[in-house]
Image (spheres, rainbow, N blue to C red):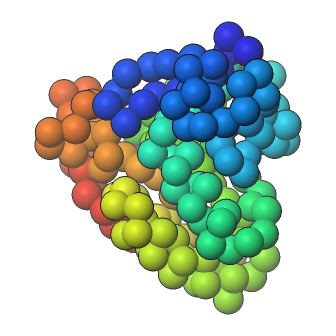
Amino acid sequence: MNAITVILKNGQFTTLKEWHEKYDLKAGSDQIGKHFSLKEPKFMQDLKEYGELIVNEQLIRVMDGLRETLGVPLKINAFNRSNAKQEQLRRAGYRAAKFSPHVAKMAVDIDTDSIIQTRERVKKLKEVSSKLGIKIRIGYEEYLQADQSFIHIDVCPEYYAKGKPFHSKPHPDVWEQSMTW
Ligand SMILES: [Zn+2]
């Protein structure tokens, strides 16, 4: 399990073992969150493709919060991404940004079944974010218009805003504030 890294709220990196203690998860288990395990197909795919899986504390808290509020399992469409993968998507003509929150290991894309479900989940997501006090950025409207039903969630403001641990790392200004697009 050495291939798992957790970026803590303060920007420090830790092991799965330490994360289990800190977040009150069962020692030695494959839990990464209260409701998410390393058996999650997308996590297994990322581990296989990149040889590692990097998650961050604030994103896990939001994912667990959303999962608890909805009361149903979430399907993850996208999680980690490498620079090479991002470049590949760009060249293939996808609307992949130059700086991706997925490459920064700040983001997750959650699958949805319908426009109604997308809107419901976005509403819940905003409630969860405000309840937890974790700033998030939510992408969905643009994707709906392109007939894609998923919600992009990232916690970039919690790491890149002024006074946050990664503020000095190169990043687009739009990563510093909550927003919905
Ligand atoms: Zn995304």
Q: Specify whether 178 is left or right of 56.
A: left
Where residue 118 sits: x, y (%)?
A: 64, 78
Question: Height in image: 140 above or below 105?
Answer: below
Residue 5 seen in the figure: no
Residue 12 seen in the figure: yes
Residue in view at x 52 percent, y 56 percent? 62
Q: Specify whether 126 is left or right of 37.
A: left
Residue projecting furthest to the left: 162
Where residue 46 sits: x, y (%)?
A: 73, 30
Question: Height in image: 144 above or below 75?
Answer: below
Q: Specify whether 131 is left or right of 125.
A: left
Residue in view at x 55 percent, y 37 percent? 23
Where residue 80 sits: x, y (%)?
A: 61, 35
Total numbered circles: 0
Pick the front one: 87 or 9: 9
Question: Height in image: 23 above or below 64?
Answer: above
Where residue 140 sits: x, y (%)?
A: 54, 71
Residue in view at x 36 percent, y 46 percent? 156
**Rendered image quadrant of residue 104:** top left
Residue in view at x 46 percent, y 52 percent? 154
